[in-house]
Amino acid sequence: MVVINIVVFIVLEIMGSTTDTLFMVRHGAMYEPLVTQQGEYYRLFTCMFLHFGVQHLFYNMLLLIFVGDMLEKVAGKVRYLLIYLGGGLMGNVLSMVVAERTGNFAVSAGASGAIFAVVGALLYLVVRNRDRVPEELRRRMIVMALLSLIQGFTQTGTDNMAHLGGFLGGILICIVVCHRKNKKITYKR
């Protein structure tokens, strides 16, 4: 996922500027009226791979490297992919629904909704397997998840509904794809 995001960023930077809002809209960024009124539903997916500038990309990919690697180790590649993409889509859908209800539209892009899905899934696995996860790791995961959510709500220009929807979507998808009777997923170092 990190490589895909970086390649998409490089290609877009060669074609134009990822800090130009109109350029980003033309290349798949999320803008709710284009989805709901024009039927451009692909934006719910494509916006997960677009970033506004190198700093936006850097911070998202740095976090994804850390949390994504942890989830992939405990859940496996296929489950990780389902959680990442499905949770990211759920985050974007929640963001779109809230924007439609409030009339507060904004152009958005970034992998953070999908990253929050990964964080939500990790938190669920840590809590579910608390007897197999060291207490210090459990506490750190809970604090990281809470701080990540709080940070989004204290910053301007952040799609908090995509973060919240991704987080909750990651938990729900993880419950479905990682739940096996009598078999718990364990953390591998």
Image (cartoon, rainbow, N blue to C red):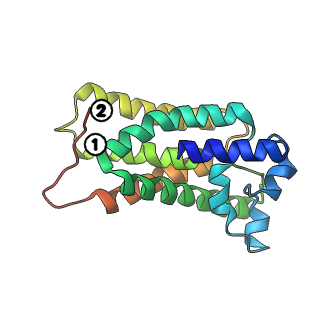
Q: Which residue is mark 2?
A: 138
Is label 1 in a helix, a strand or a loop?
helix
How dense is the environment of label 2, judged by Cα within 10 Å: few (below 14), some, or many (20 and up)? some
> Residue 79: which quarter of the image?
bottom left
Left or right: residue 166 versus residue 50 is left
Q: Is 112 situated above or below 171?
A: above
Q: Is residue 51 visible?
A: no
User: Relative to 103, does residue 158 appear above or below in the rendering?
Assistant: above
Of the residues shown, which amino acid type is indicated by label 1? Val
Mark 1 in CB contact with mark 2 (< 8 angstroms):
yes
- Residue 99 image position (x, y, % from top left): 71, 58
Residue 53 visible from this viewpoint: yes
Q: Residue at x 74, y 54 (%)?
A: 29
Q: Is residue 93 above or below residue 64?
A: below
Question: Which residue is the extreme one toward the top?
Answer: 136
> Position of 145 compared to 163: left or right?
left
Residue, disc 1:
127
